[in-house]
Image (cartoon, grey):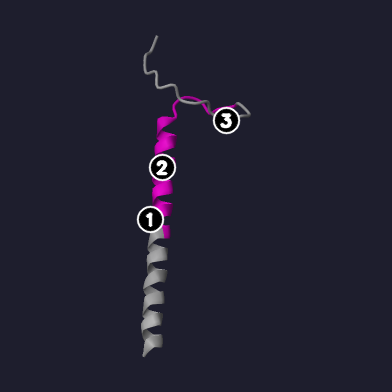
Amino acid sequence: MAGDEATKHQTAADERKARLAAELRANLQRRKAQARSRRAGEADSRVDGLGRETGDTRQD
């Protein structure tokens, strides 16, 4: 009897782990898409990648 309850608890824990992993992957995909959409202009050709965003939205 105690073994059945332990198995049920383990199964619930595994389901929770799988659900959280799926949510984490979905969140990562949303964040990547958001970062790509914020990036404007040509592809970055610098070796060190993108520079830090300054937050300055003025167009001179």
Query: Pointer 1: what residue?
Result: 23
Instruction: Label 1, secondary structure: give it.
Output: helix
Q: How far apart are the two marked residues, 1 and 2, measured between alpha carbons?
A: 12 Å
Dominant secondary structure, magenta: helix
Earlier in the chain: of badge 1 and badge 3, it is 1
Image quadrant for the C terminus? top left
In the displayed structure, 48 sits above or below 9; it is above
Instruction: Tell me which residue sits at (37%, 14%) in the image.
Output: 58
Residue 19 appears at what percent x and percent y?
38, 62
**Dot 3: within a 10 Å radius of its alpha carbon, few (fewer than 14), some, or many (20 or more) residues?**
few
Instruction: Tell me which residue sits at (59%, 27%) in the image.
Output: 45
**Dot 1: within a 10 Å radius of its alpha carbon, few (fewer than 14), some, or many (20 or more) residues?**
few
Q: Residue furthest right?
A: 47
Residue 35 appears at what percent x and percent y?
43, 36
Instruction: Tell me which residue sits at (36%, 83%) in the image.
Output: 5
Image quadrant for the N terminus? bottom left
Magenta highlight range:
21-45
Q: Residue furthest bottom?
A: 1
Earlier in the chain: of badge 2 and badge 3, it is 2
Query: Pointer 2: what residue?
Result: 31
**Dot 2: within a 10 Å radius of its alpha carbon, few (fewer than 14), some, or many (20 or more) residues?**
few
Q: Which mark is residue 49?
A: 3
Q: Cβ–Cβ below 8 Å for labels 1 and 3?
A: no
- 35 vs 43, left or right, is left
Instruction: Tell me which residue sits at (44%, 27%) in the image.
Output: 40
Instruction: Label 3, secondary structure: give it.
Output: loop
Q: Quadrant of residue 16?
A: bottom left
Specify the amino acid type for callout 2.
Arg
Residue 15 appears at what percent x and percent y?
38, 69
Q: Cβ–Cβ below 8 Å for labels 2 and 3?
A: no
